[in-house]
Image (cartoon, grey):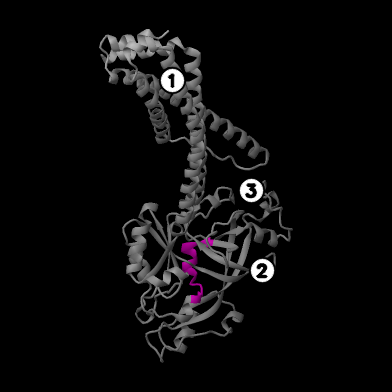
Amino acid sequence: MKSMDLLELAARNLRESVLRNSLTTLGIGVGVASLVAMLSLGIGLQQMTTRRLERSGLFDTVMVTRGDVGFGPRRRNAASAENQRVLDDSARRDIAALPGVLEAVPNIRTVAQIRYDDKPHRAMVAAMPMSAHDREAFENLQGSFFSSGNAAEAILQKGFAEELLSLSPGPADASTAGKPSPELQPLLEKELVMSYAARVSAPNAAGAQTASAATTRPSATPKEESAPAHSTDAEANPLLAAFSVVPETRNLRIVGILAADPDAVRGLGRARVFIPQGFAEGLQLMLPSDLGNEAGVGERTYLEISVRLRNPEDVPRVEEAIRRMGFNAFSILDASRGLQTAFKIFDLFLAVFGSLALAVASLGIVNTLVMAILERRREIGILKALGASDMDVKLLFFVEAGAMGLVGGVLGVGMGWTIGKIIDFGTNFYLHRQNIPPQTLWLVPWWLVILAVGFSLLVSFVSGLYPAARAAKLDPVKALRYE
């Protein structure tokens, strides 16, 4: 039988029982719609979570520490303590030179005294690179970001800003999370005075240290000059960098107030005042790593360096290269592997439950085609008497089943997309009423459309196996005698 004759005959048979075939096709469409809707929900939730993590600056960041310092699982990759490389400026330059690395920024943070309106406050001060402006935490920044990497400016955490103005903390509910506070507006463009411990290098003996401190601090007050200084014993170990610890003060201009936490990856010691990275490095802040400085004179050592990459896909390769240098490397991708596995299992369960309706629809196809066999016994007998083979009869029923599956699959994709848009609209309408930013909960990628239509065709063909085989087995003599 020619292909065109086969298609024309199948189309005529489908038109003869329009209502029954339409209901069967609609059943397939409902099954595909449930499958698309379920998988779209899982994909949308996964994409929303991934976007938020990417906007937080965590997916493209690798945290580097010394091989003998760090989180538990990383100790397995550390070299022996006596051969451990120091995480200093030289190591920082080597890491920054790795392919795919945008910047290697040391973690600079210290506790300082912040004076505002002649009232002292203690706060953790942290350096923030200019690249942090792209992070999600700064989307609702009240005020502005740093004007440059070396500006004497500060961005305050919202809770610390409320403390400076003696305000009670605002309500911690979803409607106000990440929102600017009008009562904090007066703080912008005001001056803070930061008092901190500075590390002043002294290449010679203790007397030279004092002279160096005096020459590098022309603005120091007599009270500060009389303050006791701490210095390393350079004579006992000339490899150690000799330095003095002296009190310093700097004026900072408040340019922004931050409601969200840009440093959510850290648990303890979260900062309340942020200053530009270049400006912080120029202050020569006394860091905890300076107490055990093993680098040469002029080299700063760090407890941690944050490495930002151009592409999150380069994270495993860069981590391995850093570990070969003798350091520990950790990224949020290491911790998110369990989350990705959970999402895959979640998507699998959604696909199974969504396929149940399609399985029910497949029974409708079987029922429709079996009824067609009973109604068309004489027709099948005539076809076989005229020379149609068993394969021709099977192909006829396969074409009819495939046509219902194809139309039902396309219809189901459209229904599933519409259901997702309606639920997205309703959800975002509710979120808008609660003053929460809109979210995209449903996502239908192109591969899901192809998968849904293909799966619908496959189910239809499988459902047509039994009716096609039964029709092909009909005896033409008995079929022609059938009334």
**Nearer to the camera, 437 or 448:** 448
Residue at the spot of label 1: 370
- Most foreground residue, 92 or 387: 387
Give the structural element (helix, strand or loop) at label 2: strand
Asked if the residue under mark 1 is in contact with the one under mark 2, i.e. CB atoms within 8 Å, the reply is no
Q: Decide: few, some or many residues near mark 3? Use Cα within 10 Å; few <14, some 14-19, many ≥20.
A: some
- Number of numbered markers: 3
The quadrant holding residue 96 is: bottom left
Q: Which residue is mark 2?
A: 121
Q: Which mark is residue 208?
A: none
Quadrant of the drawing holding the N terminus: top left
Left/right placement of residue 211 relative to residue 247 reads left
At label 1, counting other C-alpha atoms closer than 10 Å, the crowd grade (few under 14, some 14-19, many 20 or more) is some
Q: Quadrant of the C terminus?
A: top left
User: Of callouts 2 and 1, which one flags the residue occurring earlier in the amino acid sequence?
Assistant: 2
361 or 90, which is in the foreground? 361
Q: Amino acid at mark 1?
A: Val
Q: Residue type at mark 3?
A: Lys
Q: Earlier in the sequence, mark 2 or mark 3?
A: 2
User: Which residue is located at x 27 percent, y 14 percent?
Assistant: 388
Q: Quadrant of residue 75?
A: bottom left
* Residue 179, disc: 3
Judge whether residue 280 is colored magenta.
Answer: yes
> Which percent across, then down, holds residue 427?
61, 37
Structural crowding at the residue carrying mark 2, measured as other residues with C-alpha within 10 Å and reported as few (<14), some (14–19) or many (≥20):
some
Name the spot of residue 181 as percent of width and height, x first: 67, 50
Residue 65 visible (yes or no)? no
Q: State the extent of the magenta-drawn residues as a range.
A: 275-288
Image location of residue 474, percent across then percent down:
34, 17
| Circle nearer the viewer, 1 or 3 | 1
